[in-house]
Structures are given as C-alpha cells and as structure tokens.
Image: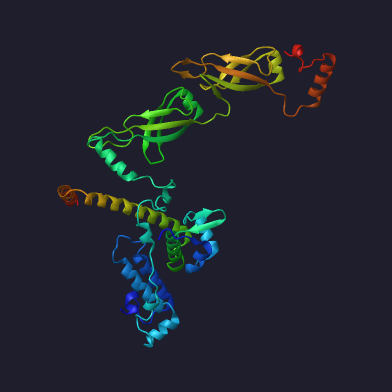
Amino acid sequence: MADPYEVLGISREATQEEIRKAYRRLAKDSHPDLHPGDKSAEARFKEIAAAYDILGDEKKRARFDRGEIDASGAERQQPEREFYRQHAEAGPGFKYERRWQGSGPEDEDELFTQIFGQRRAGARARGSDVGYTMAVEFTEAVNGAKKRVTMADGKTLDIAIPAGLQDGQILRLRGQGRPGLKGGESGDALVEVHVTPHPIFRRDGDNIRSVLPITPGEALAGATVQAPTVSGPVQLRVPKGSNTGSILRLRGKGVTSPHGQGDHLVELRVVLPAHPDEELVRSLTEWEAKHPYDPRKQGDRA
Amino acid sequence: MTDRIIAEQEVISAVEHLDAQALRRWIDQGWVLPHRDGENLLFDPSDVARVRLICELHYELRIEEDSLSVVLSLMDQLYEARRHLNALLSAVDAQPEHVRAGITARIKAKG
C-alpha cells in the first residue's frame, strides 16, 4: 500500500485545506464515472480515496503519523462499491442516455442509420438544405429589397426579397446550404420570412388598407389632404360630404405581385379635436337642436 | 439486479451526504429519473448509483449545481457515444476474418 502523502502528492506538513484541495483535484482527474475509457482510473481513484480517508480526517491522520495505523488500515473499511458506469454501459436502452436531447426513449441506433444511410447513397451526395428564419419590414415585403443578413448560425446571405412577398413565405437560395460530399452539389438555404406588422398599413391580398383621420370640417366641405402610401405620401382629394367609414381607392398604389397590381384603400375616420372647446360644443348642440337626426336609425345616416 | 426497486427513504439513508430536499431538486431538474407510482418514487439500482455519483461530484469534489448540469449532460453523451461504439465494435467482431482485416487496415491507414 502506497504512502498516502505520496498518493495525494503533498508534504507531511500540508494543512487540512491543502489535503482537501489535492484530493479534489486528483479525484476529478480519475473519477471512473467521468473517465470510462480509462482502465486504470478505478484503481487510481480507489487509491486516492483510501489516502484521503486517512489524511482527510485529522484524528486518523495523527494516528497514521504516529504509526498507530498503516496505509492499508483505512482500506479495509472501504466497502466494495459499484460505480455508475457499470450501469451506464450495461446494455441498450439505458434511460439516462438521451436525456440531454430532451427526446423520448431510445431511438434505435439512429447513429448507424445516419452513417450507413448516407454512405449507401453513393460517394457523391448532395449537401443537405438548411432552414433559416428572418424578419422583413412591411414596406420591404411590399416593394421588394436586397438585404445582406447574418443568420443564427453565423452564415451571411445576400437575399433578394421579391416585391409582394407574403408573410410566412419561404425563399430558396440555391447552393447556400451544406456543401455536398465528394463533388456533389451543395444544398439550398430555405429562408422562412416573417413580415413585421406596420403601424398604419395592412395587407389585404394585393390591396393595402389604411385608416386616414380627417376633421369634421374636411369631411363636410371636402379637402385635399396628404395620405401615406407604401410608395410615399400622395395628395388625396376627400370629397365633400365624406364620413367615417367612407373608402377612397388609390389605384395602383397597392402591392405589385406576380398576379397583378393592387390598390390602396383608404378608410376615412372623422376625428373630433382631443379637447373640444365651449364654442364647438355650443354651436353643435344648438345646430342639433334645430336639425335633429338619429345616426342609429338607418334613414338618417349619411 | 436491475429489477430491484428501492424506496426514496432507503435511497436517502443509503447515500452519504444526501438529504430529501436535494434529491427532490435533482429529480425536478431531470438529473434523476425514478419511476413514479402515485405519490411514491421508486428507484432502481442505476438511479441510486447516479444519485451517489451526483452527491460525490457535488459534496466531495465541490462541483456547483450550475456546473453539474453541464457535467451530467456531457457524461450522458459520452456514455451514449461509448454504447454506440461498443455496438459497432461487436458488429465488426461478428464479421468474417477478411472483413475484419479490411476494417483494421483501413483504420490504420487513416490513423
């Protein structure tokens, strides 16, 4: 039986803390469950544990130092122990095996299917496709754009977004996937595109819809006001006698797509001032008293 | 030996340093997967060996619980890889002599 001080690689004057540290370091390096491929790990670990069993305990260490017990004195107390690896390597279907993938029990030798499946396909093999997702601004999706994007896996792709792109559409970039085997062609990158909603515009097929606030005066007397569209602001003529819910069509200002050219439908909304003053309230109530109408009744609505 | 079923209380008294709280925490983390029978947790010998290992790594080798999840995940992958390798080796072993010789030659040439 080796000298425990030598086993732990420490001097006879070492403090208890130094002994603990030496033990932890050596035990980590030789724990059989952490080094299943190392045949000597178990013997080494047992020797370290036996040495620590004596030196880690101050009383036992003192008895050892006085020669009352020898190095094997403690060894007899160590019960024959079993290690985890005896279970982990016992046979197929070990339940802790796939825990790290979060998948269910045993996938029957998936690894070999992977290896042999690929080989059987022949020496030349096309690389696999790679899936990505990316976000695109609403106006970029409508008008089209060219973008250079760095994907989650670090790959940089130049992506041409076609005008009229739909939310959830998948763009295929030829040859941008995994490289092929032995001269086989590369796979493709499949980019699923998510269109970010716009605060004003809404897509309705190839048409764009938006709501345009106007004042009661503009609604009653008619006016020319500025309205935003996906291709920039335009001057919009609000006809006399317009009302909330009236829809004005801006021809050709919608989405240009392979099936044609959409329009922009502007829905008007009459908006009162946020803080109506006396004068407005008085004049309107006086007017209403003279010209009663019930907007909740069919015939009275404009 | 894998048929033997051990109750939670038995596990706690059999494994040095272990207390009920720590055991429940490790089960919640998915580090230990006992069989559940209603309220009762039933452990098999591999569960107990794993609990003993976790205790040793944590209380004796002072690996913190945060790091332990990494250690256990790597360890599980290591054992899985070794199991695959063993399966492959025994498949090679079952091949006729000339096939085995061909495989050995190829490994040496690549190595």
| A183 on left or right of A169 | left
Q: Residue at x 34, y 32 (%)?
A: A188
Model colouring: rainbow
Q: For this rendering, which residue is in front, A60 or A110?
A: A110
Relative height, residue A241 to residue A32 (above, below): above
Residue B57 appears in which quarter of the rendering?
A: bottom left
| A250 on left or right of A242 | left
Give the number of callouts.
0
Residue A93 coordinates in the image, percent (x, y): 38, 51
Residue A210 appears in which quarter of the rendering?
A: top right
| A295 on left or right of B69 | right
Q: Residue at x 80, y 23 (%)?
A: A281
Residue A15 coordinates in the image, percent (x, y): 42, 79
Residue A34 coordinates in the image, percent (x, y): 36, 61
Relative height, residue A12 to residue A150 (above, below): below
Relative height, residue B57 to residue A125 (above, below): below
| B104 on left or right of A302 | left
Question: Which quadrant would the N terminus of chain A be assigned to in this image?
Answer: bottom left
Q: For this rendering, which residue is in front, B47 or A11?
A: B47
Question: Which quadrant would the C terminus of chain A be assigned to in this image?
Answer: top right
Residue A9 coordinates in the image, percent (x, y): 33, 75
